[in-house]
Amino acid sequence: MAMPSWFSRLRHSSKWLFNSMRLQASCRTRTSSNSESSKTPFPFWSSSLLPISVAVSAGSLALYPQSNLSLCEAPNANARTEFVVKGSHKKVPQELIDELKAVCQDNMTMDYEERYNHGKPQNSFHKAVNIPDLVVFARSEEEVCKIVKLCDKHKVPIVPYGGATSIEGHTLCPHGGVCIDMSSMKNVKALHVEDMDVVVEPGIGWMELNEYLEPYGLFFPLDPGPGATIGGMCATRCSGSLAVRYGTMRDNVISLKVFLATGEVIKTASRARKSAAGYDLTRLMIGSEGTLGVITEVTLRLQKIPQYSVVAMCNFPSIKDAADVAISTMLSGIQVSRVELLDEVQVRAINIANGKNLPETPTLMFEFIGTEAYSREQTQIVQKIISEHNGSDFVFAEDPEAKRELWKIRKEALWACFAMEPNFEAMISDVCVPLSCLAELISRSKQELDASELVCTVIAHAGDGNFHTVILFDPDNEEHRREAERLNHFMVHAALSMEGTCTGEHGVGTGKMKYLEEELGVEALKTMKRIKVALDPNNIMNPGKLIPSHVCF
């Protein structure tokens, strides 16, 4: 159960936001009806009783088949985060097991430990009452097609599995069913150096892909948690620290090949960099979290590896000063590639975890890229901005080894939180607001977080208004759980009151469904459900995710 590394690094992304949440707790918590908390009388397939999660950020977050699901359930006005997602059980037909065996042969298992590992939340406090009834290891598009068709015929849920790095319960299997492990489909199918694009299978990780691309002077610019795979990154519409310069997954995917619930395959676009032909099916599938189909091929836009880079770091007396500098830097027109903010609690965690002696104050980190002269010019401009906002201890590095050491501070934040509370779990949030609102949201959030008895750290992709709060709590302590949830609600409602979003890059899954009606409105959710029903009439694709169960039309 390889939880530590992935778990910690994902957790870094939710600490920030929670302080700001409380102030906005007055904001409505209306139909927070979460898939998890919804008590749907759906027949589902699963025999075990343990949590199931993982697999989103990596492989392909593809589907959660659900059959006979109610299309309209009464909203629960008092909905709250459920730590165990409920679901009903229906035994998988022996006929389906035999048919899958004929397709997958030895690449299929009903071993309890294997099913538990595929259904257990490794990077999330979310759990489900059931785990997959069987796990199949898809090796080709042909196998995916047959598996999907068989599950649709028997109305059995499907949950694709990849890198197991998601944190919002995207791949929980509350109704059991079939887990499709996509990790074997990780080939690079075609590289077009002159076109600066690459065609890959969904199971390849972004880090593996960049190792492959480096000799060609190219790289894929999104950098979520280690272990994340391209398929899962598409499914969750993820981003990372480089999004401030290169955009999110929606901006870097040219086209997809997707198998719908019926087994039909669609190619969402050509390989052209621009197209105005028809509906944008690529963007429809990006962020659909496996509720519309299984991704089997991805064409990605690539970038040239920067000629030169400078990494800089500085300290501030308050979190607001640091956030103000991030905003001023973006308004200056400087094209930074990274602007990352750590609060003093996160820096303390890094010191404890790694034996460092960094000043325990709010810290900003920058990366500037381009030619050597341009990178240095950017550094000098930002240094001037910092001096006007009470910044101090400005240091920068140009030597490759020194840059790696300096940037390692930010990377270690992903694992360092649990050095302070090794036996706790983390509730991670991921709000994002218009850039002009960032300083206010962070300041309000910090006040609330600092007043809490729980240990909370803040990490932000400050250049695009996205910040994370990691709230450490004892899962066996009911008061801890209530306090963690209170902070989470506060932060989300504060962000929504500023025309922000409940999730900037982690996705909805089961954990954020309760906020969607307040953020998007019921008509938008009804439209989503119409699309879902049209493409997945038997509701076998990752059912109970993304769209609140009370939404009907």
Image (cartoon, grey):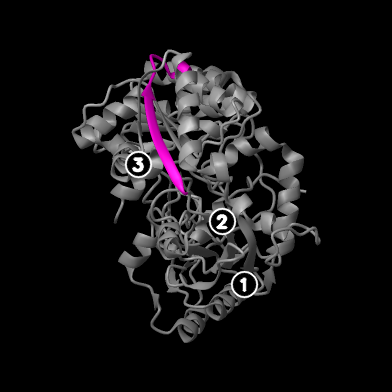
Q: Of marks 3 and 2, which one's residue comes earlier in the chain?
A: 2
Specify the farthest residue to the bottom. 102
Residue numbers of the magenta segment = 307-321
The residue drawn where x is 58% and y is 59% is 290
Q: Which residue is mark 3?
A: 411
Residue 245: percent from the left, percent from the top?
56, 41
Q: CA distance from mark 3 to mark 2?
A: 22 Å
**Visible in this render: residue 485?**
yes
Closer to us: 48 or 461: 461
Q: Nearer the viewer, mark 2 or mark 1?
A: 2
**Residue 171 at x, y percent in the picture:** 48, 55
Q: Quadrant of residue 351?
A: top left
- Residue 247, magenta (yes or no): no
Amino acid type at mark 2 = Cys
Packing grade of label 3 (10 A; few <14, some 14-19, many >=20) is: some
Distance CA(mark 2)–CA(mark 1): 23 Å
Question: Which residue is drawn at the image coordinates 55% and 29% (left, top)?
Answer: 492
Mark toward the start of the polypeptide (3 vs 1): 1
> At which x and y percent is residue 153?
62, 75
Residue at which label 2 appears: 234
For the N terminus, the quadrant is bottom left
Q: Position of residue 393 (x, y in %)?
A: 33, 20
| 334, above or below 106, in the image | above
Q: Which residue is mark 1?
A: 152
* Residue at (38, 14) in percent of width and height: 317
